[in-house]
Amino acid sequence: MFFLNLSLPEFLTILGSLSGVMVALYLLDRMRKHHTVATLRFFAAAEKPPVLKHRRKLQQPWSLLLQLISLLLLLLAIAQLRVGSPARYSRDHVLILDTSAWMAARFGDRVGNGRLIDRARLAADNYVNALPPADRVMLVRADVLATPALLFESDRKKIHLAIDQTQPGVAPLNLQQALDFAARAQKVQAQRPGEIVFIGAGRIPSEQAARLSAPTNFRLIAIDGPTEHVGLRKVSVHRATDDPDTWEVFIAARNYGAVARSVPVTVAFGGSPVATRRFDLKPAAEQDLTFRFKTRAAGWLETRLVAQGAAQGATQDTFRQDSRAILELPARGAVPVTIYSAEPDLLRPIFTAIPGVQASFLPVSSYKPDARGGIVLLDHFAPPSPPSAQSIWLEPPAGKSPIPVESTAPKVKLNQWQPDHPLGAGLRARDIELASAEIFRPAPGDIVVARSDAGPLIVARPGNPKTVVLGFHPVRSGMKYQLTTPLLFANIIRWMAPDAFRSWELTAGTVGTVDVELDSEVDPNSIRVQTEEGRSLPFTVEGKTLRFFTGAPGVVRVLSGDRELVYSLTLPQPGDTIWRPANIKLGLPPRAPFGPTSRDLWHWLALAGALGLLADWILFGRNDRRLRAAKGIAPGEPLRKAS
């Protein structure tokens, strides 16, 4: 027999305290009585206070004994007295079921063979059936995140249903997090902690296995799977720096088995092959390759490892989820720029030198204000109605300029740029003497790109559409032979159409923690990390490294300035090593005896205590009132013998 809610010292302390109070109530004499009189004239003060005599014996010992027995029974019910051994009483176990991507592998070469997750579910059902009926189980599904599927539950139907509904995902296994979660759950929620059981293949990264340690109450039920496997680790694509129309492709593959493998890899774009290579992989080794191909069109880039059958003398790979990766490449579009100028030859070399720009040179007489899309450049003239598209104005007439002209000054020196704005980024040329220039009067919210001592020379107005006005013609000034001139127009076009200069990098990888190497240290407020649905993800930036985490497969976009990185986190990745710790419990436990290991008595004890109090009231309390009523004694006055 043992107590569930109280320890023996606690039980004895409470019982002794309450029993002492109850006995004292039976032994104490009554308090002095108060009498109401008409006057104190005939009363004299007593020289000595009256001495109260305490009772020498109990007046109703059987009533006291019955109440003490009832109190004992009620305290036993509160302490939850149980019959049996406390070592065999119900315990709370945490069952960790491996739901990593590797659990989708099949345990045989035949197509009809089941998956590893099927064996894991069967082992989990057998483990639950081997437990005593009163034991409770928490089910945790473990991949890159530890997700509780069921809290501590003793209902076997609910436990088996949660096990049957468990399916593998696409994420790797983070076993350390699952063990930490199980230990915290037992510490906070468990009444009597039992075992922490892991059922699965146990494939984890090698760096995680080096620092992983099993808890003292750990049990491992290993699910052995295939040993030979080759899979893709990463596929990355970005535009070449020397040719924007060329894509550079990086592919990495790994041999997870113990036998050397030679695996072909094919790459197709839009359904047409663009490359065929071969990986010669040593056991437990990784290899990568790179190649280039040229296209301006958008399409799907598919990378596939060609499976080898038994006919070629190789063991068939039973896990094919990481043998194929698909990336959607964007088209390289060109920004249409329509230039209305009477001297197009002055501006032609500038715009032909800017990549991603499709320039059209038209005479001033063919101007149309309703041009949709693109950018319009107006060279030294102002149309009757302003363009509806984004526009660049070169030395417009003072009376029709979109930015008011304050004055026209001769021999002006350009001596200051706005370096902290994209329009002035990279512009270093100063003290450029201009024969004549318009000085603008910007409105609140306008951006002054360049200025002189006399005032602003280049002003940009954000909005829809955007407008940039130059108070001078760069080619007719001292900027004609400087690199600042094409850079200035490139900055303007990048500001108006950022997609034209956006650099793309696409990567196929696995879910979890992703590290992104930035070009330089940037302000975290200018970075956006969002899913394909537009939901923002939290991230951290340390120096040039951006880090974010996602536990669900999908596409994540990292936007940093004019650079966009697209991560297709749908490529499963099994662990590098199989974790098998030493000095732990292995396999299923012996089946517990049928029936409960201990019996709860608190219901009967509480009922007996209540009946004891009821009997005391019937035998002694009710008879006492009848006796008082017969003798005419007040309820509060004690009974005394006649003398």
Image (spheres, helix red, strand yellow):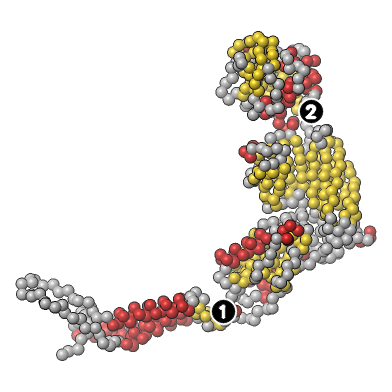
Which quarter of the figure has residue 42? bottom left
Q: Specify which label sits upstream in the sequence, 1 or 2.
A: 1
Of helix, strand and loop, which one carries label 2? loop
Residue at 63% x, 64% y: name it.
182
User: To which residue does mark 2 refer?
Assistant: 355
Res. 245 mark: none
Q: Position of residue 157 (x, y in %)?
A: 64, 70
User: To which residue does mark 1 refer?
Assistant: 86
C-alpha distance separating marks 1 and 2: 80 Å
Of helix, strand and loop, which one carries label 1? helix
Q: Amino acid at mark 2?
A: Pro
Residue at 65% x, 70% y: name it.
216
Q: Amino acid at mark 1?
A: Pro
| Callout 1–callout 2 Cβ contact below 8 Å | no
Which quarter of the figure has residue 574? bottom right
Q: Position of residue 69 (x, y in %)?
A: 40, 84
